[in-house]
Amino acid sequence: MPSPQDIDSVIEDWDYIPGEVNARRVTARDGRELLQMRVDMGLLQMESELRPDGTRPHGAETYFDYLVGEVVREGEEFELSQDQCTEADREFVQYYHRRLCWLSLREYGKAAKDADHSLAFMDFVREHSPDEEWILSHEQYRPFVLFHRIQASALAALDDDGPELAITEINKGLDTFHELFLQYEAEDQFENDELVVRLRDMRESVRKRFELGDTLDEQLAEAVKSENYELAAQLRDKMHHKQVTEPSTSSRSDSMPQRSSCENGGC
């Protein structure tokens, strides 16, 4: 007699594929939306709102929120304990898994939101960590989280606002990447960094698919760089006029061409 506790029926006909993120939405008995990710020998199940495991640490919406409250209570000299470091790591992992699910499901706005949570939490632990080694154990993943943030925001812009703003999001993200490399005195590695190259490939794929030249932002940056201030002023006027006359995103989204694999740099 089968056990009511096994998950055979849940993962039946849902194979685990190594190297792929396989996620789906399901509805719980009480009607709330859940996310599931297929993993080797089972699955992960996550809440779609607030903390992925559905808990409220010490009554707060997330563990990050709880720790921010501790700083308010104890002052800026607050330092994380070993147990708090462990709990912070748990929350980082949970948000990582859910971010992968959102990207797989093409819920780019939600993926960007979860990436923002992780990046802000990284900033927090950098300020309040008990030792440098623990800081570095998180900072090594900052470029990867930032890459997901840029990728998600660009694809959300492509869905909602069009290819020009998607390219603008990528360019803004590349500027943020450059600042990160400067911060760690690694500017010489910036041009050939794998994630930077992938973002540039993604940008050029969008440009090619939608047959775009340089965006107004890019033209303005080049005009300022070459000290052509008259052209820069004309471009600013043009950008302002475009913002005033731009059609609503809802009227434009219905006619947007369908994408295939912009996520991988090839639209």
Image: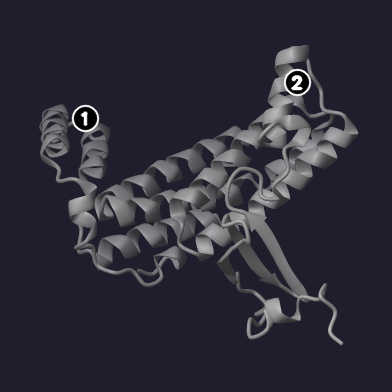
How many numbered marks, from 0 up?
A: 2
Relative image position of residue 135 (x, y in whole percent): 76, 36
Residue 26: image quadrant is: bottom right
Mark 1 touching mark 2, by CB under 8 A? no
Q: Residue at x 10, y 39 (%)?
A: 245
Q: Residue at x 10, y 34 (%)?
A: 241
In this figure, which residue is indicated by the disc labeled 2? 70
Q: Disc 1 marks which amino acid?
A: Glu
Pick whichever, 135 or 128, lies toward us: 128
Q: Disc 2 marks which amino acid?
A: Glu
User: On the rendered image, what quadrant is the N terminus found in?
Assistant: bottom right
Q: Which mark is residue 227?
A: 1
Q: Few, some or many C-alpha atoms within 10 Å of disc 2 (few <14, some 14-19, many ≥20)?
A: some
Q: Is residue 71 above or below residue 185?
A: above
Pick whichever, 41 or 80, lies toward us: 41
Q: Residue at x 51, y 43 (%)?
A: 177
Q: Is residue 190 visible?
A: no
Q: Is residue 22 visible?
A: yes
Q: Is residue 230 left or right of residue 173?
A: left
Q: Residue at x 44, y 56 (%)?
A: 199
Q: Disc 2 on helix, strand or loop?
A: helix
